[in-house]
Image (cartoon, helix red, strand yellow):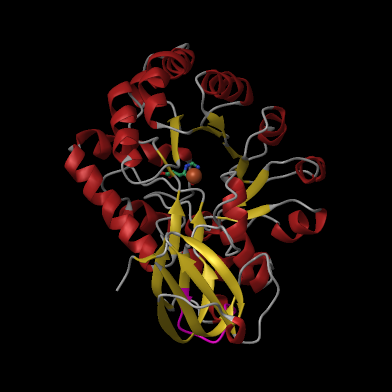
Amino acid sequence: MSTLFSNIASLVTNTDGVFAQPAFVVEADKIAWVGEAKNAPAADSRVDLEHKTVIPGFVDSHAHLMFAGDRAEEFSARMQGQSYSAGGIKTTVAATRNATDAQLEANLARLIAEMQAGGITTFETKSGYGLDVENESRSLAIAAKHTGETTFLGAHVVPQEYKDRGEGGTDDYVELIKNEMLSAAAPHAKWIDVFCDRGAFNVEQAREILKAGIAAGLAPRIHANQLENIGAIQLALELDCASADHCTHLTNQDIDALAHSKTVATLLPGAEFSTRSKYPDARKLIDAGVTVALATDCNPGSSYTTSMAFCIALAVREMHMSPAEALWSATMGGAKALRRSDIGHLSVGARADFALIDAPSYIHLAYRPGVNLISDTYIAGRAVTK
Ligand code: NIG
Ligand code: FE
C-alpha cells in the first residue's frame, strides 16, 4: 500500500535539497520516494496536503514525563524573585511515590497527546521522581510501554531519607543506584543519565553511576552544567555519552572538546525560560562545530512545556540560532542525541514521521510564537492527530 503526498507549500527533508513543487511517497511505515511532484511514481492513493509545509517530526531527546502533581506555586514564587535549585524535585518525588500506576500512566498519556499534537513523533523520557527501587522501576516499566527511548535517572537528586542519614547518606544512595536500583531498572531502560551539577551529583559519583549503567548494558547520557560548571563535559566525553544536556555553563575548552567528539550538546531553552536563567551560548557552540540538539526538558519543575515549537522560538529569539538551525536541531539534532539514523529526516528509507505546518514555511514556527501551527502529525506513515 503506497500513498503519494502532494500539493505541499514547502518540504524540509534535512538531507535532500529543495524541490519547487515537492511530493513524497510513503510505503508501509517508510518514505519510499521524494522529489518533484511531476516526477512522482504511481501510488495506490493520494493525499492532498492543501499547500501546507512538511517537516520531519520533532525528536524530543530529553523529557521527564514520569511524575505526578505539579509545582505551579514554586513557579509563581520563582517569578517573584525566588531562585531555582535542584531541591524542588522532592515535592514531585513525594507526589510520584503516592500516585498509582494508572495515575502515572494517565499523566504520561496526556503529555504524549500534547507532544504529538505539537508535532513530536519520537520522545525520550526519564525516570527520576521515584528515587527508590520500586518507584524508579515502575516508572520505567510504564514508560517503556510508550517509547523505546527510556532513561534511568535514579541519580536525579539524593532523596530526603538518604540526606537525613547525614554524612555517608549520599554514598549509600549511590551504592543503592549502582546495585539494586539499577538491576530493577535496567530491563525497562535503554539509557542511563545522571544530574551532574551543584546540589545533585558530583563528577566522581556520576562516573561511578554511569559506569555501572554501562556495565549493565545501558548507554550513557548526562545532565551537564545546568546550574554551574562542575566538570561534567569532560566526563561526558570520557564515557562517550550520546548527549550532554543543558550545557548552560561551558568553558572554551569544553566547547572545543565537544566539537571534536561524537557527543551532542542538547540545549533546553524551556528550562532557562522557566527559571529565568541565562541561556546557553548556542551560537558559540554551533560556530565551533558542535552538534546541537533542542529538546523540551518537559518536567513539572524547571520546564513544564511539551511544545517544541516554543523551544524553537526561544532558540531563535534568545539563543541567536537561525530558524533553519533551530529546526534541524529539533529534528536531526534530536535523532543524533539518541544515536538514531532512522528518524529526524525524510529521506528514502527513513521512518515516515512528519508534521504538517499550516503556514507557507517552517520559519513561521519561530515567527509566530505561541501559535500551534501544527495541523497534523504522522508517525510511521499513520496520522496520529485529527
Ligand atoms: O532537567 N536538571 C534536572 N532535572 C530537571 C529539573 C527537574 C525538576 O526541577 O523537577 C531539568 O531541568
Ligand atoms: Fe532534564
Q: Please state the total of marks drawn on the protein image.
A: 0
Q: Is residue 230 visible?
A: no
Residue in the image at 42% along x and 20% along y? 182
**Relative to 45, residue 253 above or below:** above
Residue in the image at 54% along x and 65% along y? 32
Q: Nearer the viewer, residue 77 or 39?
A: 39
Q: Which range is magenta?
A: 356-363
Prevailing secondary structure of the magenta residues: loop
**Relative to 186, residue 105 above or below:** below
Q: Nearer the viewer, residue 189 or 84?
A: 189
Residue in the image at 37% along x and 31% along y? 188
In the drawing, does residue 230 fall left or right of residue 135?
Answer: right
**Relative to 20, residue 190 above or below:** above
- Quarter of the image that includes the C terminus: bottom left
Q: Is residue 151 visible?
A: yes
Q: Quadrant of residue 87?
A: top left
In the drawing, does residue 316 fall left or right of residue 257?
Answer: left
- Quarter of the image that includes the N terminus: bottom left
Give the x, y percent position of residue 327.
Answer: 60, 67
Question: Residue 360 colored magenta?
Answer: yes
Give the x, y percent position of residue 298.
Answer: 42, 53
Question: Residue 122 colored magenta?
Answer: no
In the drawing, does residue 217 fall left or right of residue 247?
Answer: left
Residue in the image at 51% along x and 72% along y? 25
Give the x, y percent position of residue 8.
Answer: 52, 84
In the drawing, does residue 44 fall left or right of residue 105?
Answer: right
Give the x, y percent position of residue 171.
Answer: 49, 14
Q: Quadrant of residue 307?
A: bottom left
